[in-house]
Image (spheres, rainbow, N blue to C red):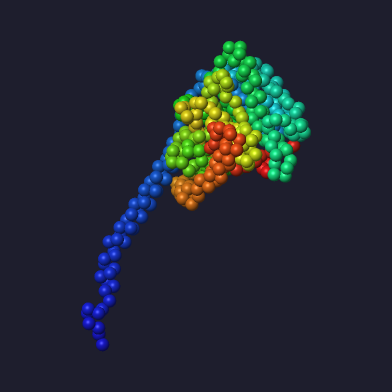
């Protein structure tokens, strides 16, 4: 028996009412996909354009080149020595002073640096190459002094790694102090880590943001595509990078620039090579590397000396600290070749994948908990020791680092 019309189900009418809404959602989804695709293609074309950019301008500045080495013999002989000689010739022998400090290596670094010293002598390059026989073992065998030592959870008193590194880095400034006292002037300091680089990389770094910066850093790689120095790098809001691959950052300002391969505004960076105007280093008092106070470190927090120097630099806020994503150095030749080869160019799909990975990580992770733990320890230290707050708060991490005979470790 057939049901009356008014009792029949009205599926067709129901479907008809929902169809416009369904179409709207599909249209919106399509527009989002199209916009995202166009965005990624735009970033891809920007990446390609960077490869055909004109070469950086020739150097017209006087550069103080500073470098520290420890157990770098293989890299020194395979790449670094030759690269430095080529760099000096590119910048102009008359425009540079090279200050190198080697800190108690147990490999053949001293002989490799003696070979470099002889080459620089033949080129009549002004320089200071200091080789130290004081090893890590000698350092930690000393009786603990008032500064630079910390009591670890096992009850032992150990030498702090960061204060040791800060002291080592500051040794290269002795030559600068003598030269400044004699009335000599430089425009910039160029810090060179134990990395593979070319003179062109340095020229491009010096020209970051048209030469206007408080600091300009390269990108460093040991195992591409992940960048290496997470300890010193902080985005424009003072956060750690959200990921170690492109586009790296959490903050909108830093991420926007990184996606477009522009100089990236950051709070701090180091990452292999750094150029900074000379002014703060010859001021009174001069800017120098440091660590956080021992009393703060006992609360199980630490900070890189290469981050703190930006926190202390009076020009960081006015002139800006920039990471140059187009200057890529490596801690070995394999890494350097990989990040500078045509194969390193990201396809539109690779870019789309990376952009979405960054979005997902930003949505599902939050740095506030990690930062809150450190902030609570900082406040406790400030209250219990009646100390003023640490200027480099954004550099702090939840770690304790000590020096060992052949390296260092977390405790």
Q: Position of residue 410 (x, y in %)?
A: 67, 43
* Front one among 295 and 124: 295
> Vertically, is 180 above or below 231?
above
**Does residue 248 appear left or right of residue 66 in this picture?**
left
Measuring 70% from the left and 30% from the top, which residue is drawn there? 146
Would you say residue 320 is visible in this rendering?
yes
Measuring 49% from the left and 26% from the top, which residue is drawn there? 315
Would you say residue 230 is visible in this rendering?
no
**Does residue 327 appear left or right of residue 291 in this picture?**
left
From this viewpoint, which residue is outermost toward the top? 182
> Vertically, is 406 above or below 172?
below
Q: Position of residue 26 (x, y in %)?
A: 33, 58
Q: Position of residue 202 (x, y in %)?
A: 55, 28
Q: Which quadrant is the C terminus positioned in?
A: top right
**Does residue 96 appear left or right of residue 149 in this picture?**
left
Measuring 45% from the left and 35% from the top, which residue is drawn there? 262
* Front one among 225 and 236: 236
Measuring 27% from the left and 76% from the top, which residue is drawn there? 9
* Front one among 379 and 35: 379
From this viewpoint, which residue is outermost toward the left? 5
Quadrant location of residue 334? top right
Quadrant location of residue 140? top right
Q: Position of residue 283 (x, y in %)?
A: 55, 19
Q: Which quadrant is the N terminus positioned in?
A: bottom left
* Front one among 35 and 44: 35
From this viewpoint, which residue is outermost toward the bottom? 1
Looking at the rendered structure, the number of numbered marks drawn on it comes to 0
């Amino acid at each position: 028996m057939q049901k009356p019309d008014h009792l029949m189900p009205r599926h067709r009418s129901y479907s008809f009412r929902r169809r416009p809404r369904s179409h709207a959602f599909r249209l919106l989804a399509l527009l989002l996909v199209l916009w995202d695709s166009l965005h990624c293609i735009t970033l891809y074309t920007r990446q390609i354009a960077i490869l055909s950019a004109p070469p950086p301008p020739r150097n017209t500045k006087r550069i103080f080149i500073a470098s520290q080495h420890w157990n770098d013999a293989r890299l020194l002989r395979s790449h670094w020595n030759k690269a430095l000689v080529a760099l000096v010739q590119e910048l102009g022998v008359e425009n540079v002073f090279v200050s190198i400090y080697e800190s108690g290596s147990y490999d053949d670094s001293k002989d490799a640096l003696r070979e470099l010293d002889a080459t620089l002598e033949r080129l009549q390059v002004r320089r200071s190459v200091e080789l130290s026989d004081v090893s890590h073992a000698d350092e930690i065998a000393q009786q603990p002094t008032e500064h630079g030592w910390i009591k670890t959870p096992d009850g032992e008193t150990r030498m702090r790694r960061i204060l040791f590194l800060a002291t080592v880095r500051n040794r290269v400034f002795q030559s600068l102090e003598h030269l400044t006292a004699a009335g000599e002037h430089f425009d910039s300091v160029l810090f060179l880590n134990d990395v593979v680089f070319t003179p062109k990389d340095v020229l491009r770094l010096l020209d970051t943001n048209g030469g206007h910066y408080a600091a300009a850093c390269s990108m460093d790689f040991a195992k591409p595509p992940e960048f290496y120095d997470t300890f010193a790098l902080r985005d424009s809001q003072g956060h750690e990078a959200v990921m170690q691959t492109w586009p790296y950052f959490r903050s909108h300002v830093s991420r926007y620039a990184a996606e477009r391969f522009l100089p990236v505004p950051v709070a701090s960076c180091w990452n292999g090579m750094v150029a900074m105007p000379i002014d703060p280093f010859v001021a009174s008092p001069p800017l120098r590397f440091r660590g956080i106070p021992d009393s703060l470190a006992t609360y199980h927090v630490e900070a890189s000396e290469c981050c703190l120097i930006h926190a202390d630099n009076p020009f960081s806020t006015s002139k800006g600290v920039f990471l140059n994503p187009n200057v890529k150095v490596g801690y070995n030749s394999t890494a350097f070749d990989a990040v500078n080869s045509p194969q390193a160019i990201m396809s539109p799909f690779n870019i789309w994948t990376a952009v979405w990975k960054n979005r997902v990580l930003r949505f599902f992770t939050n740095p506030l908990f990690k930062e809150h733990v450190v902030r609570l320890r900082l406040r406790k230290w400030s209250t219990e020791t009646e100390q003023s707050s640490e200027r480099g708060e954004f550099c702090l991490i939840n770690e304790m680092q000590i020096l060992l005979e052949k390296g260092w470790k977390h405790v």
